[in-house]
Amino acid sequence: MMMNGGGPLGIAAVSVAVCGLRRVPGLVRGGFAAADVDHQEREPRDMKQIASRQDVDDALGQDGAILFKYSMTCPISANARREMESFLERRPDAPVFKLDVHEAPEASEYVAEKTGLEHESPQVIIVRGGKPDWHATHFDVTASALEEQTA
């Protein structure tokens, strides 16, 4: 986060990285940005980690697989992680695979190449028959949407 000067009442304009890809202006009060996320937030449970092209191929080969691409530095991804947690509480046997786009950028780009879907983060892709059947990005990643699509 970069400070861009101060303002009245201790309010400073800042630039925050959203999903690690673009910079947008935000406001800080008392040292906390509205876009701050708890980076120590627990990892989504019961998700298999994708870290390589082979992991992507394995996930895409599993019918009904759900691929969840996210960033640990993005507040929108933090919201999507909470939605995924909620989904997994209701559907603990769902075959969910997680991919941190900063930790495994090659795997993330490979997902885009293999599925034909433009890279976004956060992003959820449901695979059926080895091909993407449904996907959602950003605030459209919700537990209820996943439940509806996997019913």
Image (cartoon, rainbow, N blue to C red):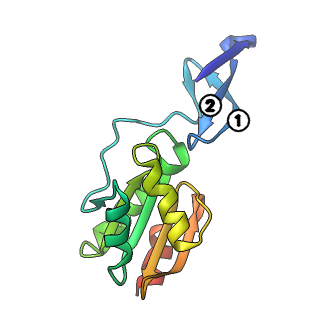
Question: Alpha-carbon neighbours of circle 1 within 10 Å: few (<14), some, or many (≥20)?
Answer: few
Q: Which residue is mark 2?
A: 16
Residue at image x 59%, y 69%? Answer: 117
Q: Is residue 141 visible?
A: no
Q: Which mark is residue 76?
A: none
Q: Is residue 134 visible?
A: yes
The quadrant in which the N terminus is found is top right
Residue at image x 63%, y 23%? Answer: 28
Element on which disc 2 rests: strand
CB atoms at circles 2 and 1 under 8 Å apart? yes
Residue at image x 55%, y 49%? Answer: 76
- The answer to whether 10 appears left or right of 68 in the picture is right
Element on which disc 1 rests: strand
Q: Is residue 15 above or below residue 109?
A: above
Residue 83 on image: x %, y % = 43, 61
Q: Which residue is mark 1?
A: 24
Residue 11 on image: x %, y % = 68, 17
Dot 2 or dot 1, earlier in sequence: 2
Q: Is residue 38 above or below residue 78?
A: above
Question: Alpha-carbon neighbours of circle 2 within 10 Å: few (<14), some, or many (≥20)?
Answer: many
- The answer to whether 26 appears left or right of 62 in the picture is right
Q: Give the quarter of the image for residue 53.
A: bottom left
Residue 39 on image: x %, y % = 39, 35
The disc labelled 1 sits on which kind of residue?
A: Val
* CA distance separating discs 2 and 1: 6 Å
Q: Residue furthest right?
A: 8
- The answer to whether 57 appears left or right of 118 in the picture is left
Residue 108 on image: x %, y % = 47, 56
Q: Is residue 106 above or below residue 39?
A: below
The disc labelled 2 sits on which kind of residue?
A: Val
The quadrant in which the C terminus is found is bottom left
Residue at image x 42%, y 88%? Answer: 129
